Amino acid sequence: MNFLIRLLVSALAAMVTAYLLPGVKINNFLTALILAFVLAILNLLVRPVLVILTLPATVVTLGLFLLVINAVIILLAARLVSGFRVDGFWWALLFSIVMTVVNSIMHSLAGGDNDRD
């Protein structure tokens, strides 16, 4: 149940973020829901591999290279999900930052911290 709530909150956060950023387009809420699911899968499978492969760059940049990894994940999701478009790397980077903030705010409003027992 917790995964479904997180998925819905992430989809809503993606819609809000796409509304705020002119370089990102999401066609409808179903596309946002598919995007949230694809991002969850990519973060589960691809992100750990990228983090390990880029560990030296991450250490040298004091962790800021993780933002680049997030942008790459967003660009990969844009290729996999039809109806989701990002105009370039910088828009993907900005999308990942804004979506993280919006997702955190929405998750705290939804009471996501209370269901950790």
Image (tube, rainbow, N blue to C red):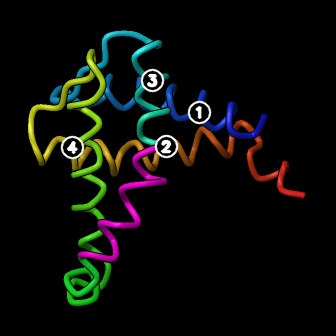
Verify CB contact (< 8 Å) between mark 2 and mark 4: no
Could you tell me which residue is drawn at 49 percent across and 22 percent down?
Answer: 33
Q: Secondary structure at mark 1?
A: helix
Q: Which residue is mark 1?
A: 7
What's the residue type where badge 1 is placed?
A: Leu
Quadrant including the C terminus? bottom right
Precedes in sequence: disc 2 or disc 1: 1
Tell me which label, 2 or 4, sits earlier in the chain: 2
Residue for badge 2: 40
Please tell me whether mark 3 or mark 4 is closer to you in this view. Answer: 3
Q: Quadrant of residue 19?
A: top left
- Asked whether the beta carbons under mark 3 and mark 1 sit within 8 Å of each other, the answer is no
| Quadrant for the N terminus in the image | top right
| Secondary structure at numbered mark 2 | helix
- Tag 4 residue: 92
Which residue is the site of mark 3? 34
* Whether label 3 touches label 4, CB < 8 Å: no
**SS state under label 4:** helix
Please tell me which residue is depicted at 16% across the width and 41% down the height of the picture. Answer: 91
Residue 86 picture location, percent across and down = 17, 31
Q: CA distance from mark 3 to mark 1?
A: 9 Å
Percent from the top left, x then y, of residue 65?
A: 24, 72
**Residue type at mark 3?**
Ile
| Mark earlier in primary sequence (1, 4) | 1
Mark 1 burial class by Cα count in 10 Å: few <14, some 14-19, many 20+: many
Q: Magenta region: which residues?
A: 40-53
Instruction: Measure the alpha-carbon separation of dots 2 and 4.
Output: 16 Å
